[in-house]
């Protein structure tokens, strides 16, 4: 039997994962679009089902706190998802496209995973 070294996933790819009511920001997304930002506002396009995330300098009634767990960060979006009927039972992976006109990140769907399968014991 020969072993192969696992060299990890590509943390340089800007992506965001929706996992059981939390958005998980990759290191690349944080560095490229958010820097030291601690708050975000969430946007939703009913026509396309796309999510927008806007970096915010200050906390106000419509912001969500971005919690850093380096090398990534998370934000709790369970209420946002429930309000817009976004299914959080499966993990979803999104690429990030910056919208200069609106000053926000737009999430473009990449993959969907069954959370129960991914979390089941070996």
Image (cartoon, rainbow, N blue to C red):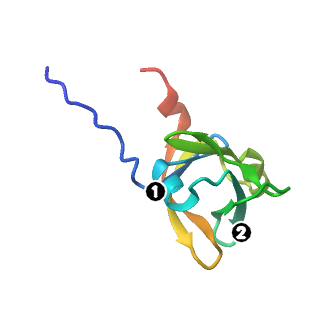
Residue corresponding to mark 1: 14
Picture quadrant of residue 44: bottom right
Q: Which residue is mark 2?
A: 46
Please name the residue shown 33% across and 38% down the image: 8
Image quadrant in which the N terminus is located: top left
The crowd level at tag 1 (other Cα within 10 Å; few <14, some 14-19, many 20+) is: some
Residue 21 vertical position relative to residue 85 in the rendered view, above or below: above
**Number of other residues with Cα within 10 Å of mark 2, as a class: few under 14, some 14 to 19, many 20 or more:** few
Q: Secondary structure at mark 1?
A: loop
Distance CA(mark 2)–CA(mark 1):
24 Å
62 sits to left or right of 73? right
Could you say where residue 102 lies in the image, as x and y percent from the top left? 65, 75
Instruction: Look at 62% across and 43% down and name the residue there.
Output: 74
Q: Is residue 46 above or below residue 119?
A: below
Query: Could you say which is closer to the camera, residue 2 or residue 10?
Result: 10
| Picture quarter with the C terminus | top left
């Amino acid at each position: 039997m020969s072993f192969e070294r696992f060299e990890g996933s590509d943390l340089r790819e800007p992506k965001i994962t929706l996992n059981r009511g939390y958005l998980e920001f990759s290191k690349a997304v944080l560095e490229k679009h958010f820097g030291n930002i601690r708050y975000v506002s969430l946007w939703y396009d009913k026509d396309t089902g796309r999510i927008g995330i806007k970096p915010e300098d200050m906390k106000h009634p419509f912001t969500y706190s971005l919690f850093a767990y380096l090398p990534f960060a998370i934000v709790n979006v369970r209420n946002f998802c429930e309000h817009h009927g976004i299914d959080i039972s499966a993990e979803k992976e999104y690429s990030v496209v910056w919208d200069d006109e609106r000053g926000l990140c737009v999430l473009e769907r990449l993959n969907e995973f069954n959370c129960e399968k991914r979390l089941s014991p070996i």
